[in-house]
Amino acid sequence: MTMLEIIDVNGGIDVSQSPDAEEQRFIRLLQAKQKAAKLHFFIQDALGGSSPTVWEVARSSITPHSTTSFGRVSVLDDLITAEPDPDSEKLGRAQGMITSSDLDKTALTMSLNLYFTCGKYKGSTLCIVGRNPMDRKNRELAVVGGTGVFRMAHGYAVSNTHSYNVDTNYGVLEYIVYVAYVDDDEDCI
């Protein structure tokens, strides 16, 4: 199969034309039934203190003079928990990059991978991207993919600031994620 060939997902799988196992799996996934999940969790965002989980890695020449920190790029590796308390059940990590990208308002462009480390989603990821206007409630971000259980995921996430401590520079972010994904059970088709 060349890169420009089109896979006929409606005609079924013809093993003689697609001997590659991964291609067969992809076609099966396209034909599979969708499942949906609502995930509710909290992200522990340590911007300061003795063990920060968010680090600035770049800034533009305008950043120090910008009221919105325009041009600042940070990477993060935040803890995901079941409850707002950082000592509650640990579910995984939120890893990715955030960029201050609005000249007039405090808004971030986000690229996050939610990596789940326990439970039925252990080893799976969800990819979340979008514009996050920090001064708003119910900030919506797109779920654009995933791996493992969440293969071929799509949906959206609603984010809110649950709490923020100015003195310690520590925030707790609440996320509710509505995600559709395919059932990768071979018996489902």
Image (spheres, rainbow, N blue to C red):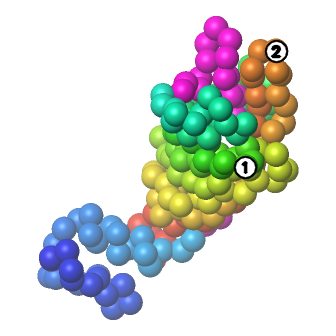
Task: Return the x and y of residue 153 as percentages of the image width and height.
Answer: 53, 62
Residue under the image location 55 percent in, 24 percent down:
55
Residue under the image location 62 percent in, 60 percent down:
142
Task: Return the x and y of residue 69 as percentages of the image width and height.
Answer: 65, 36
Residue under the image location 19 percent in, 74 percent down:
3
Q: Is residue 66 above or below residue 180?
A: above
Q: Visible in this render: residue 52? A: yes
Q: Which of the two discs, 1 and 2, labels the residue nearer the N terminus?
A: 1
Q: Indicate whether residue 54 is drawn in magenta.
A: yes
Q: Mark 1: which secondary structure?
A: loop
- Side of 61 relative to 49 (left or right): left
Around disc 1, counting alpha carbons within 10 Å, would you say few (fewer than 14), some (14 to 19), or many (20 or more)?
Answer: few
Q: Which residue is mark 1?
A: 104
Q: Find residue 71 and report its image quarter.
A: top right
* Chain part drawn in magenta: 35-56
Q: Which residue is mark 2?
A: 167
Q: Find residue 154 and report its image quarter.
A: bottom right
Instruction: Kindly identify the amino acid type of the residue bearing the numbered disc 1.
Output: Asp
Q: Nearer the viewer, mark 1 or mark 2?
A: 1
Residue nearer the viewer, 2 or 132:
132
Q: Which mark is residue 157?
A: none
Residue nearer the viewer, 173 or 181:
173
Task: Return the x and y of residue 60 as percentages of the image width and height.
Answer: 51, 36
Q: Mark 2: which secondary structure?
A: loop
Quadrant in the picture for the C terminus: bottom left
Question: In the displayed image of the protein, which residue is found farthest to the bottom?
Answer: 11
Magenta stretch secondary structure, dominant:
strand
Query: Alpha-carbon distance for marks 1 and 2?
Result: 25 Å
Instruction: Kindly identify the amino acid type of the residue bearing the numbered disc 2.
Output: Asp
Residue nearer the viewer, 92 or 166:
166
- Side of 147 relative to 144 (left or right): left
